[in-house]
Image (tube, rainbow, N blue to C red):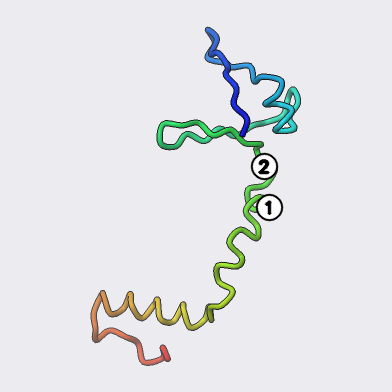
Amino acid sequence: MLTATARLNHKNQITLPRKVCHALGVKSGDELLLIFRDGEIHLRLHPVSFAQALRGLHKNMWADTDIEQWLIDERRSWMKRRNADSLPPHVP
């Protein structure tokens, strides 16, 4: 884990310490993404495409699941909550 400090200037800007830039692999002009969550700021490289950055994330999560059956069961649960008698006849 890398720890560093930075000071906020009068323009609300910070200068990242050289060791942080080196660890992130960033250089002057690179775009960064700041995520504020639970009172903390997380700094990441700004992805060119969020879809590209998220592709494959949790791919093993559904490995042992029949997605079609899961979707049918999920939709049935919605219908049961709305009205037990409203289940359309075409849903297996």
Outermost residue to the top = 10
Give residue 83's position: percent from left, percent from top. 23, 79
Q: Please state if 23 lies on the left or on the right of 8 as rendered.
A: right
66 sits to left or right of 45? left
Q: Position of residue 74 (x, y in %)?
A: 40, 76
- Around disc 1, counting alpha carbons within 10 Å, would you say few (fewer than 14), some (14 to 19), or many (20 or more)? few
| Quadrant in which the C terminus appears | bottom left
Q: Indicate the position of residue 12 as horizontal and vertical percent values.
A: 52, 14
Q: Nearer the viewer, residue 57 or 2?
A: 2
Element under label 1? helix
Residue 11, located in which quarter of the rendered image? top right
Q: Residue at x 59, y 74 (%)?
A: 63
In percent of width and height, residue 64 lies at 56, 78
Q: Name the side, left or right, on which 14 lies relative to 26.
A: left
Name the residue located 61 percent from the left edge and 65 percent from the top edge.
59
Q: Amino acid at mark 2?
A: Pro
Q: In the image, which disc is placed on residue 10?
A: none
Q: As drawn, is 48 to the left or to the right of 43?
A: right
Who comes first in sequence, dot 2 or dot 1? 2
Q: Amino acid at mark 1?
A: Gln
Label 2: which secondary element: loop
In the depicted structure, whether residue 87 falls above or below residue 1: below
Residue at the image point whose x is 65% and y is 37% from the top: 46
Tags 2 and 1 touching, CB below 8 Å = yes
Residue holding disc 2: 47
Which residue is at a point 70% across and 43% down the rendered structure image? Answer: 48
Image quarter in which the N terminus is found: top right
Q: Which residue is mark 1?
A: 52
Identify which residue, 92 or 2, lies in the foreground. 2
Within 10 Å of disc 2 (Cα), the crowding (few <14, some 14-19, many 20+) is: few
